[in-house]
Amino acid sequence: MRGNPDAVIVGSGPNGLAAAVTLSAAGLKVLVIEGAPTIGGGCRTEELTLPGFWHDVCSAAHPLALASPFFRRFDLPARGVRFASAPVEFAQPLDGGRAAVVTRSVEETAARLGADRRAYRNLFGPPARHMDQILPELLAPLRRIPAHPLAMASYGSRAILPAATVVRNWRTPEARAVMAGAAAHAMMPLTAVPTAGIGIMLVSLAHAVGWPVAAGGSARITDAMAEAVTEAGGAIETGRWVRSLAELPPATATLLDVSPKALISLGGDRLPSRYGAALRRYRYGAGVCKVDFALSGPVPWTNEDCRKAGTLHVGGTFEQMAAAEAEVAAGKHPERPYVLVVQAGVADPSRAPAGRHTLWTYCHVPAGSDVDMTAAIEAQIERFAPGFRDLILARSVRTAADEEAHNPNYVGGDIAVGMQTVRQTIARPVARWNPYRTPIRGVYLCSSATPPLPGVHGRCGELAALSALRDVFGLREIPDIGPARLPVKSTSPLSRTRYLLSRYRREPLMDPVRTAPA
Ligand SMILES: Cc1cc2nc3c(=O)[nH]c(=O)nc-3n(C[C@H](O)[C@H](O)[C@H](O)COP(=O)(O)OP(=O)(O)OC[C@H]3O[C@@H](n4cnc5c(N)ncnc54)[C@H](O)[C@@H]3O)c2cc1C
């Protein structure tokens, strides 16, 4: 890159890259600096076990990427990224060969739930039907009057509750297990608020868009983003950990895809003490221990439908999963943990040599744990899939402490970069009208420690970039981040100029937090 960049972005996770995509699309010269040897942060794919076995290092299931307004406008399919869905979106195996099974259809799913059929339909049907109205609100800071207040009120009235309260009158182990499996993604006890909100959002997304994997691996998503940045003239440097803002090349804006803990040390004396103290009060949650397997064949789940599922929540009944999560919150390592499993090969055979499979798993553990949970994870899978252990060709293990060592954003192994309490959902990481702006002029936080929430959706990065565009570059229009369909070379300079101008949307960007584009 010739000369100084207009904007420097520290970190190339999906949010750092979303910020880079947005700023590049506005015509700015962007430099992304990544500490790890490869780009992608929590959205990478590597041969973690054996050659030819491609494992998603972090994120694997992508309902949020598929539904995200940022990625819809970025247009992943036009950039060659394909999502692949399994016949069953997700399943929870139960003892005795039973299972709770969620497919794209609310009706089909509810039909298997006997006495809870109507309750299931009533809870998940409306948000699934109105996901296009609800999700833009959920994927923006909670600051404005929703564009669809009725749909939001109906979702919000239950979302604010603990998962345990929402299902207290449900009778079938299957229906209760669906809620437990989805709500436990919150990494909090199922008696805590707002675990129902996370559960309802995730189940409704399964019905509205599915829980696909990215064909070829999650890295395809971040690779497409990086390509858009470099095509627009931006540069990406890897293998350079930034320890202080003073190390960065001069730039008008700096966007940090880092944790609040890292912001404290990067900002040093430049951060006002009150803001620093508020960042220190930010609470991180439980960690994860992740185990990836190379298998000689598909997992032999006793229940046939589980063999067709992309994702599985393995932990038994609502009560068993709730007990495991409560133990983690109490600082213990459960003997029978709640295990998240993704069998990408069901939807995407390209992940392993013919006939072989990869298996992605993790369980929750106390923050900072260095305990290897492989034995407990294998025992839980073996419980519902006897013969599983015989298929294991190789394993790769990352304890919670290892997670943080690989990516400092995951403080104590907390992959959500902060507890998802009600307070930290509304005021993330601190209570400020614009949570992306830091008190240092031109410096923004753009990681998943800012609103809306963790996951691969790019909105934290996009909204931070829009804030920077308005504040320090004086640009009030939203750049078009869609793939460039440049006119053929023979087109006249005038029509090329017209085309480039047309890539800016006309509506003014008054305040990115209040008028976040959907
Ligand atoms: C095991 C695991 C499973 C997950 N599963 C899913 C899933 O299935 N679906 C889903 O949607 N989400 C999932 N997530 C969450 C998702 O990956 C994250 O929410 C998302 O990646 C956050 O994006 P980000 O850009 O904010 O941060 P990250 O993706 O964490 O990226 C931050 C980047 O910044 C770099 N960095 C940090 N500090 C510095 C520094 N000082 N100098 C230079 N570089 C720095 C890091 O190396 C990293 O590359 C999972 C995460 C993990 C770890």
Image (cartoon, helix red, strand yellow):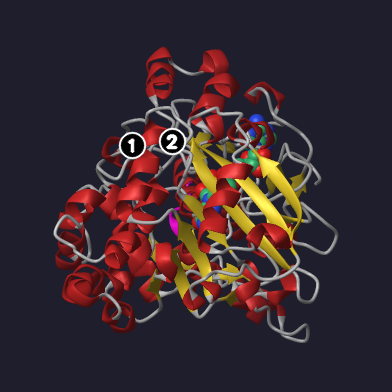
> 273 or 103: nearer the eye?
103
Give the residues drawn in magenta, as a range.
473-477
Classify mark 1: helix, strand or loop: helix
Which image quadrant for residue 342?
bottom right
Which residue position is annotated with label 1? 424
Which image quadrant for residue 350?
bottom right
Ligand 1 resides in the quarter of the picture at: top right
Say if 61 sits above or below 16 in the image.
below
CB contact under 8 Å: marks 1 and 2: yes
Q: Is 358 within the magenta?
A: no
Which residue position is annotated with label 2? 418
Q: Is 476 within the magenta?
A: yes
Q: How many numbered circles are shown? A: 2
* Residue at x 72% of width, y 52% of height: 234
Say if 508 sits above or below 132 in the image.
above
Classify mark 2: helix, strand or loop: loop
> 9 or 456: nearer the eye?
456
Q: Is residue 65 visible?
A: no
Give the amino acid type for the residue marked by disc 1 in the picture: Gln
* Residue at x 76% of width, y 76% of height: 355
> 335 or 460: nearer the eye?
335
Q: Main secondary structure of the magenta part?
A: loop
Earlier-in-chain disc, 1 versus 2: 2
